Each structure stands twice: as structure tokens, then as C-alpha cells.
Amino acid sequence: MILAITTWDLHLPSCHSLKEKRGVLKPLTVGLRRTLNVSVAEIGHQDLWQRAEIACAVIGSARPVVDDVLRAADRMVEETDGVRIMDTVTVFR
């Protein structure tokens, strides 16, 4: 069994309120859950308008499968309008 957690530190330059931030992050996190069947949570910078930290957890039976899911998740985050990835960290267990 392979467990991987990827964390993205994000910049949301177009957000000027927590409501706008939620409007950007909610479709992203729901899309990740629905499309890739992963666990996703906002884990940092909850009180900042233009910053967010989200984490995605994937469990699989083989490393290549987990890698594919994480690559797809990274593409989804990267392609989200209004989001700029500042840093990405992935940990395998």
C-alpha cells in the first residue's frame, strides 16, 4: 500500500475577500474529490485572502497508480483560473 500527500502553497491574486477566495477554492477542491477520488482539505492560510494551502491525499496499491493520480491533481490545480502555485511538496509513506 502506498500513501502520498501533496501540499500546494497557492497565491490567489484576484481575491479581495474570503468570500472570493472560497469561490475559487471550493470548485477546485470539489473537482479534485469528484474527478480523482482523493481527499482534499485547505490546511493553511485560512485567514488570508490571497493565500491558500491545500493538501491532497492518495492511497493506492502501486506507486505508478499513485503517481498518475498526483500528476493529474497537479495539472488540475495548475489549470485553475485565478490560482498560482508558489510551492509544491509531496511525501510518500
Image: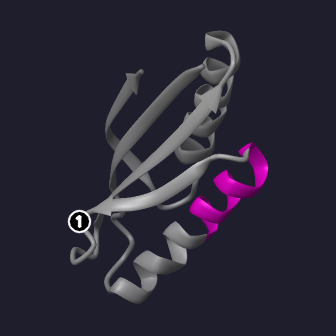
Q: Main secondary structure of the magenta part?
A: helix
Magenta region includes residue 24: no
Question: Which part of the image, by quadrant, shows the N terminus?
Answer: top right
91 above or below 7? above
Provide the residue designation for mark 1: 45
Query: Residues in magenta?
Result: 27-36
- Residue 6 in picture, x, y percent from top left: 43, 36
- Foreground: 15 or 72? 72
- Foreground: 93 or 5? 93
Residue at image position (40%, 62%) is 42
Report which quarter residue 54 is drawn in. bottom left
Q: Secondary structure at mark 1?
A: loop
Residue at image position (65%, 52%) is 32
Is 25 situated left or right of 48 in this image? right
Question: Which part of the image, by quadrant, shows the C terminus?
Answer: top left
Residue at image position (33%, 65%) is 13
Report which quarter residue 15 is drawn in. bottom left
Report which quarter residue 63 is drawn in. top right
- Residue 34 in picture, x, y percent from top left: 76, 57
